[in-house]
Each structure stands twice: as structure tokens, then as C-alpha cells.
Image (cartoon, rainbow, N blue to C red):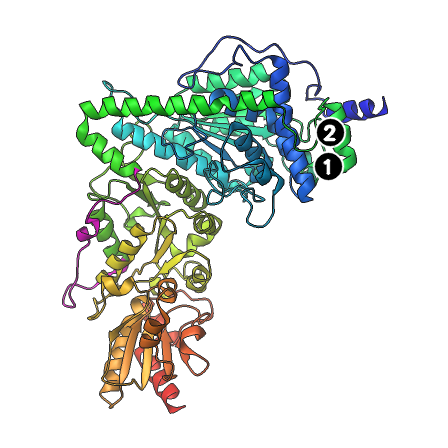
Amino acid sequence: MQMQMKTQKAMAGRTARPAAFTAPRVARKTTVGVRAQAVAAPAQVSKEQVDKCVNAIRFLAIDAVNKAKSGHPGMPMGCAPMGYILFNEVMNFNPKNPQWFNRDRFVLSAGHGSMFQYALLHLTGFDSVKMEDVKSFRQWNSKTPGHPENFMTAGVEVTTGPLGQGICNAVGLAVAEAHLAARFNKPDAPKIVDHYTYCILGDGCMMEGISNEACSLAGHWGLGKLIALYDDNKISIDGHTEISFTEDVAKRYEALGWHVIHVKDGNTDYDSLRKAIADAKKVTDKPTLIKVSTLIGYGSPNKADTHDVHGAPLGPDETKATRENLKWGFGEFEVPQDVYDIFRSAIAKGAKAEEQWKADCKAYAAKYPKEFAEFEGLISGKLPANWEAALPAFKPEDKQLATRQHSQTMLNALAPVLPGLVGGSADLAPSNLTLMKMFGDFQKNQYAERNLRFGVREHGMGAICNGIALHNSGLIPYCATFFIFSDYMRSAMRTSALSEAGVIYVMTHDSIGLGEDGPTHQPIEHLASYRAMPNMLMMRPCGGNETAGAYKVAVANRKRPTTIALSRQNMPNLAGTSVEGVAKGGYIIHDCAGTPDVILMGTGSELEMAHSAAVALEKEGKKVRVVSMVCWELFEEQPQAYKDSVFPPNVTARVSVEAATSFGWAKYIGLKGKHVGIDTFGASAPAPTLYEKFGITLNHVIQAAKDVMAH
């Protein structure tokens, strides 16, 4: 009786909420929906069996978190009904082929509740999450890491954990579906692109600004196949959200252009959840937010509706009390066979859905062979044969241009030969020069176009591009802003690198060379910071050939992102620079006979200084080698023999020149070397003045070379 009273007190702690254990209405027997037809409980599944399936999700999460002594059980306990209905009644997917193209996508934006997703993958029969994997939650090399990781666990679409990014990835997934559907579906043939994107997000995601950026765009674009379920449990790590988050989220999303539905009892009212999803599918010109009011840690007599259940195990006593409270008479990690039978009907349903899609593809191909060949080529993930032949080559006598202009040339050369190339800028297209001139803008009801207008939303832009890349349909997303504003989307860029999403980041205005806009716009530490980021290729090309080489590498690398830092100011097409050299990251562009007296190295616009300094020093009888260090990461991947051939260990007189911090250059110039660069913030003045005042000049490079040779 005492336990029951505690339970009732916890569950009724907020008057706006329904009692947690009131009997749900009887599940409807009719089917309602647009494409995924089953949105009511199948007739053969009783209400009691649904309860059992829902509790199986809860207790797999509880037991796994307890065993790991780490994790977040509260979210899975509160969201279990949503999980059951989505995975068992609504979504189309094939557990035995997680990469089936036309599957519905699911994103757990509240990634801390990862055992929710692992429990569902296990129950529905994904080979990637066996029971031993559930028991290995959060352990070394486990398929069930602390947050969902797409590169670790088949069935996980995107890597989530940094709050807010998952819903942005979901927007990207929905963009990819809308784009491909508009390009390939025909009114007189079966639809070959036809799937939904579902996302569960929480209060933390709603608080993060990135989610508003992407959801504003989703509303503007009218992404009708994006359905987000908001776990409105009003708890965060600090406690109840009333201490910091009291806005009306539903009204905000209505203002963003979303269709909004409220399910007042997400813990027991299965019918209302089913109806909300069915109603969401009927609205085809807006994304839908389903606000689902839940109780975090539902079923726990003493911890439900508290922050205690958010990020810590229930522990043995509270787990026992919860088992008794929910009448779960099964042991640790025990799943009744009838629960498996219900969930694993997904295997047969998924196989049947995939076979139907293949039949639809065959019928489509008979009518539209050319279009299907392009579609099939895209989703294969293979790049078209000889695509790189479209990249232009440059001679030293060609006109001097800024590398941002060369970048524009590359994008427009590649667009016709790379059908998957899509992208745009954060309201800087005229400066970043990122428009593909032969295509229009991706807009509501213009989804087939390939230029994306992101507005001033860098963080959301990066995360949306991650979603597009991880749709795994052959789309190659790029996005652009000034290099300094990469700070706004650094978390999304890091997630690109972590989740092996081959996004191309086009970052212009790459140094103090941008001039008068001053230190707020002038990158200093940025090159070093992205060079420090694992699995990120950081390119800073000099001239047209290196820019072409940077794009060749970036397009070819589909499992790691590339950041290309591009200049505002013009520079020559130096003799010796090449596409082939870029592929090695660092290479000799100017050399001498025999062993050099000094090695000069640089990147981007300063490589010209190194080259000019070499010419001047050679007139004084010195033997000089000049090395372009366009991409340190690629250079480090070369065999040691090659690296030693570029930088002979016995040549210690070395100088680097780059209009950026000296941080990191010691790896290549050594303790005796010198760096010509800038280790302070910049200033507002014309670019030539800045280079002179900060000592990044030809004379400074020459003097540094003489100094290191003298020692």
C-alpha cells in the first residue's frame, strides 16, 4: 500500500498530466493511413499483448542500464509505447536488410536514451543487436554504445547524442527523400521513392538552438513526410523544466509552419498515438510535430517524474519495485516468446515490402529505363565512371583568381556529371560562390532542384547535410559559409567526422586576407583546430589545380568529410601544383639539385610567398625546396619513405608560411624551424596592409630562411 501511494504521488505530480496507470482505451481494429497502412493494432494482437510488448522495451532498457551501471533508463521507460507503435505497427523496414533503400528512417534525437533503440532493434530481429549485445551495453567495442552510432550498429541511421542534432539529421533525411521522389517518381509508374522519416526528440533537443534552425527550414520547405514525436516529459538533468523552459513549444512549431498534434497521455493511450500518426500522414504539405506528454521513468514507484531516473540506473531495489508495479513477472533480460513473435513479424513484413518495391522498380524500369539507370546508379553509392575528367586543368599563364572562384568553377563542372551533388550556402551564396548555375532552388513543390538555400543557419545547415549524406542514396551534400563561421557549426562538423558522413564544407574568406571586415571575420586558429579533428580532411589549396585536386579528393571520400578553406584574394596558378600532388597531401612543387639547404613550405595564398622566396634565395646560391602542404591528413597517410623523400630527416633548416596560427607546424619544421604567420587576432584594414603589419611578407620568409640556415 505504501508503495502504491508513492507511485500515485509520483505519477500525479503534475496536475496537467493524466494518471499514469489508468486503463487505456481499447485498441481500434480498423486501419487508417496513407502509405504504411497499419496504424491500429493488428486484430491478432490483444491489448494485454501490446502492454507486454511495451513493458519488454522498458525492462530491456532497465536491465541493460543496471548491468552497465551507467545510462539513461527514464526516456525508454516513458517512450516505450511510441516505440512499439512505430516499430510494430507503422514503419516499413526490413530487419534482415537494414540498408534497404525504401525503408522508413527512424532517428532517436534524444540519443542518451539509446537503449530504447537497441531494445527495438533486438526485439524486431536485427542481427546487429543480439541479446549478448544488449547485455554488453556501453562496454568496449559493443554494438550498443552509450549513444547511437551509425557506424557501429546496423539499423541506426545517424549518430546522435549532442542534443538537437538528431532532429536536424531527420530534416536532412526528409530532404533527401523529397528530392529523390521529385526527381524520379512518375505519375504513370509505381513510386520507387516513398518513405517517411520519424524522429523522437526531447526537451533538451527543443532547447538547443540548432533544432529551431533546422525545423524552421523544414516548415519553410513543407516536408510532409517528416513526423517528429516530442517526448514532452518536462524533465532535464537539472530537474523539472519549469526552472528554465516554459515556452509553448506547440505554438512555436505552428509558427514555424508545422502541423501540430498533442497526445495528452503518451503512457497508456495507444489509440491516440495511432490516430496522431495517421492524422500526421494526411497532412502532406507540412511536417508534423506530435507532442506526446509522457512520464519519464514510467512505472518506477519512487523515481518516475524525477531527474533521478534521467541519467542513472534504477538500482536493484527500485527495479524490483518497478517489476512489481508493472506486473512484469520475468527475470533479468528475459523476453517472453510471444513478445518476440509479435515484434519479429517485422521480418516477414519487411521482406514482403522489399520484394514489392523490387517489383515496382522492375515495372518502373520498363517504362523509364534511362531514369531508372540514373536512380540505380545513385543508390548504389558508386560514382559515375570518369567523373573526375570534368575537372579543369590550369597553366601558370592562366588568369589569377581567388580559390573561391576556382571552387565555383569546380562545382559547376561537377554538377552535370555527378547527379548526386546537392548543396548551398548559409545566406552567402554570392560570396561563397556556391550556386550550381544550371539548377534552380530546392523549395516547397520544387524538390527536384539541387541548390539549397539554408539562410543564416550554419549549425542547422551542417547537421541537415549530415542527414542528407547518411540517407545513403548517393547524394553528395556540400555546404558553405565564411571559414570563421564554421565555429557556429563545429559540433555538426565533428559529428560528420565521427559518423563518417562525407559532407563537403566549402569555407571561403580563409584568413586575414579577407581584409577590412576585421578580426570578427578573420580565421586564425581554425586551420589548426580542424587539422586536430579525427577523420576530417582539412584542405587549403593554392590556385586552380589544387582546388580541382581538393574537390577530387572530397568527392571520392564518401566516409569522411572534407573542409576546403578558400581565399577571397587572387593568387597565381603556380608551376608544379597539381591534382595528383593534392592526393598525397604534401608534395614538392619546386626543387633543387641534390640536398636542399632549406625547405620552405606553405598552403593556400602563402605558397606563392614560399615559391618567390625560393627564387630569391637561389639567386644567392642557395639550394631550396618548396613543399605544398595542402592537406596534412593525406600526407600523414603516405608511406614513411615518401614522407622522408619530401622532408629528408637530415635537412633541419625549415620554414613554414601560412596566414594562421603557428600551432601544429612544429611537426614539420622541427625545433629549429621558423613559422611565418599570425598568433594573435587580426585587424580591420586592406589585406596588403594586414600582411605587412603582421609580418607575413616575402622579406620575412626570406629572412626566416636565412636565420634557420645560419643555425
Please give left or right for residue 376 compared with residue 54 in the image: left
Rendered position, 681 above or below 78? below
Give the residue at x 19% y 49%: 386
Expressed as whole percent of the image width and height from the top left, the position of residue 620 reads 25, 90
Expressed as whole percent of the image width and height from the top left, the position of residue 325 reads 75, 24
Q: Nearer the viewer, residue 453 or 470?
A: 470
Image quarter of residue 21? top right
Residue under circle 2? 300
Rendered position, 232 above or below 505? above
The reply to whether callout 1 and callout 2 are in contact (CB within 8 Å) is yes
Q: Earlier in the sequence, mark 1 or mark 2?
A: 2
Image quarter of residue 63? top right
Disc ID at residue 644: none
Q: Split into 4 quadrants, where in the image is the C terminus?
A: bottom left
Please give left or right for residue 136 compared with residue 210 in the image: right
> Magenta stretch?
380-403
Looking at the image, which residue sits at the far right? 2
Residue under circle 1? 314
Expressed as whole percent of the image width and height from the top left, the position of residue 91 reads 46, 24
Q: CA distance from mark 1 to mark 2?
A: 8 Å
